[in-house]
Amino acid sequence: PRSSVSELLDSLNPEQRVAAEHFEGPSLVLAGAGSGKTRVLTTRIAHLVQEHGVPPERILAVTFTNKAAGEMRERIGGLLGGEPRGMWVGTFHALGVRILRRHAPRLGWERTFTIFDAEQSLRQVKRTLESLDFDPKRFNPKGVRSMMSGAKNQLVTPGQFQQEHGEGFDLFARAVAKVYPAYQAALKDQNAMDFDDLLVKPVELLQNDQTVLGEYRRRFAFLLVDEYQDTNHAQFRFLQLLAAEHGNLMVVGDDDQSIYGWRGADLRNILDFESTWPGSMVVRLERNYRSTAVILEAANQVIAENVNRKGKTLRTDREGGEKIGVVECFDENDEARVVVDEIKARYQNGPALHNYRDFAVLYRTNAQSRALEDAFRRSGVPYQIVGGVRFYERREIQDVMGYLRLVSNPLDEDAFLRVVNYPRRGIGNTTVARLREAAAAEGAGLLEAASRATTLPNVPTGGARQLEAFAELVSTWSARAATTRVGPLLEALVDELGLYKALEDEGPEGEDRIDNVKELIAGALDFNAELLDELDPEEIDAFSELDLFLQRVALVADVDRLDGDVDSVTMMTLHNAKGLEFPVVFITGLEDGLFPLSRAYDEPATMEEERRLFYVGVTRARDTLILCHARQRRRAGEYMYGRLSPFAESIPEALLVPRVSPRLESNHRRSSTPHRSRPRFEAEKAGSGFVSEETFDTPINQDAPRYVKGERVLHATFGSGTVKEVTGFGKDTKVTVDFDDVGRKRLLVRYANLEKD
Ligand code: ATP
Ligand code: MG
């Protein structure tokens, strides 16, 4: 194995090599996309182990996804000729869980705590709002959750938040000041943590417990972090606490790829690294090994428009390259067809032999995947979708998981409420409400109260008996879980509950759901904690297999469902594509208002983040990049007309090959022959608000005034203003205009008599 590390080092350029051979002290690799940052990180780990004899268990590596962690582990395993047992590699969340599973009791939780996902935590916010008599219409639960989450990522405790906002002018923040502590208390009562807690609680632990801190400081002699530009304050603190003594912290990242500002990531972490860690070694990499000169030049031009950046050069030895296609399409379905046809034409064809896995289709919002997915299904081209309707978020999966969670953690009230009457067992809302009142009065947990429901005041007798039977059922399964493998356990549970029957009764839709439950069971049957190399044997012993299974599922991030073994096209949002690379990349929906999202126009910083996101998309491509945009697109049920995104326009024309989709091309041909072009009017006569696309041979609204976002207009009474949004169709086209004097108005174009200003 020794020779392979030196081979690896030999394959690096001098700057990469300096970084990979760096031994002690803080270091920063700040470099553009595709310059080998991740490769440097991996090589350095192998080097530490091989050349400096650092035991793998003294290394902590933080990656952006569990998938990246798996790859890193595999690669190092290959280099070292065996599993790097004991080395911790994972996302911040996964590492947080491991720490908490060991030390939760010190914080007042049990080690088997439940992890609430976004949905569960939102439901808890709603319950907390209710219990405090806040009107959820005035205090939007998502808004509340997001403000709390922001506070947590800043390590602002409920007490500090209360102090800062409890008496303030901002009524919303005042409400959150009340909700935040109550929400935390509710989680604790249920022995649960939400995703933010997985970061915040370990920091709290390390901050307050010198013994534990000392233990981890000794254990982790070397810390390495990928994608450092997207860390938030809590993560910054976490690293700082661990690395304070030895300073052996290496971070790699790219300020131009910071795309999680909206989730609390703080670019200052990377920009201030040198001043936070005096004496840092700083390495810049300037050579891109991923993309052709054409793609790289486009990326450089795009990102150069951002004002707020450090600025760096990136060059490649791969001269020339295929020009970037810009395809104008009719609508989202036409766009999907263009993408699929292009993939079919290039599949195992063209200059390079392509497999399906060489293609990625990227988009700005999850909803865009629907049209694409339909086109892929029709064509038979295999695809996988990362994110979207996430498997574990499906209703039937949540129901089954609800049972597993309750069996694993009897204090989990969210799970209790989810399954107490599913499948129906005659426990009505009134019964549950009474049970909750009685339990709250005694400060008891719901399941525990349910187990003696017939003795509680006000609980209807019939329902009470059912509650007791339910509690009995859960406790039987809890006992079984301690000794049974999770696969057979789940199979038997689904059977005993009669879930298939319940789903069958739902009709055809139920069949899909049954398949999903079967898929879940198959996954559980495959699950074998002993094979999870990220776990230490002592961790495996401390928990039931069910606990470990739940822990695993809770952490499976969207992007981890990417299965590299299957030959299929990958579809995902641009956010999920970070760090990945593909020979052929499509970026779809490049319309002004969609990408960049229209709200980016309100805020220069948001616009810059959108532009960085585009930069991330462009730099995923190795050989071929194709940009698609549609003239019209249905979004949330309404048609939007978009012009080409300014992002695409910032690419020099010399690098582009613009074309129109075959469908638009045939429209053009036909409409240029007399009598063929049908006036808009005829479609309107048909009377429906929706005009089927087939009715049109000419581009829509050619003769009607069309407004585009950002355009200045003049109205007889309201004066001058700027068009913010154009929605609707034909005679129903509406524009939202921000008038200089009278503010925002939504107008029906056909009545407004707007003039171009
Ligand atoms: P991103 O910013 O997108 O995360 P990165 O800087 O982490 O990119 P890598 O993914 O490590 O870049 O590398 C990009 C590609 O270039 C990979 O395919 C990698 O194997 C290859 N590469 C990196 N360094 C070299 C090198 N010295 N010689 C040959 N190929 C290299
Ligand atoms: Mg990388």
Image (cartoon, rainbow, N blue to C red):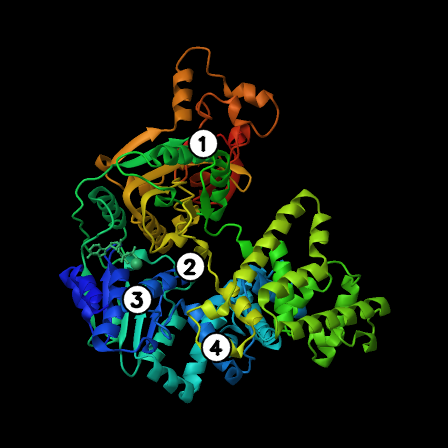
Dot 3 corresponds to which residue? Answer: 76
Query: Residue placed at 61% from the left, 66% from the top?
Result: 124
Contact? badges 4 and 2 (CB < 8 Å): no
Q: Which mark is residue 334?
A: 1
* Label 2 crowd (10 A; few <14 / some 14-19 / many >=20): few
**Label 2 or label 1, whichever comes before in sequence order:** 2
Which circle, 3 or 1, is nearer the viewer? 3
**Label 2 or label 3, whichever comes before in sequence order:** 3
Residue 214 in which image quadrant: bottom left
Q: What whole-number distance in Å separates the C-alpha atoms at marks 3 and 1?
A: 45 Å
Quarter of the image where the N terminus is located: bottom left
**Label 4 or label 2, whichever comes before in sequence order:** 2
Dot 4 corresponds to which residue? Answer: 539
Q: Amino acid at mark 2?
A: Trp
Which circle, 2 or 1, is nearer the viewer? 1
Q: Which mark is residue 650?
A: none
Which circle, 4 or 2, is nearer the viewer? 4
Contact? badges 2 and 1 (CB < 8 Å): no
Residue 110 in which image quadrant: bottom right
Query: Residue placed at 61% from the left, 62% from the top?
Result: 401
Comparing 288 with 698, the one in front is: 288
* Label 3 crowd (10 A; few <14 / some 14-19 / many >=20): many
Q: Amino acid at mark 3?
A: Ile
Query: Residue placed at 60% from the left, 22% from the top?
Result: 686
**In this rendering, does residue 163 appear at all?**
no
**In this rendering, does residue 358 appear at all?**
yes
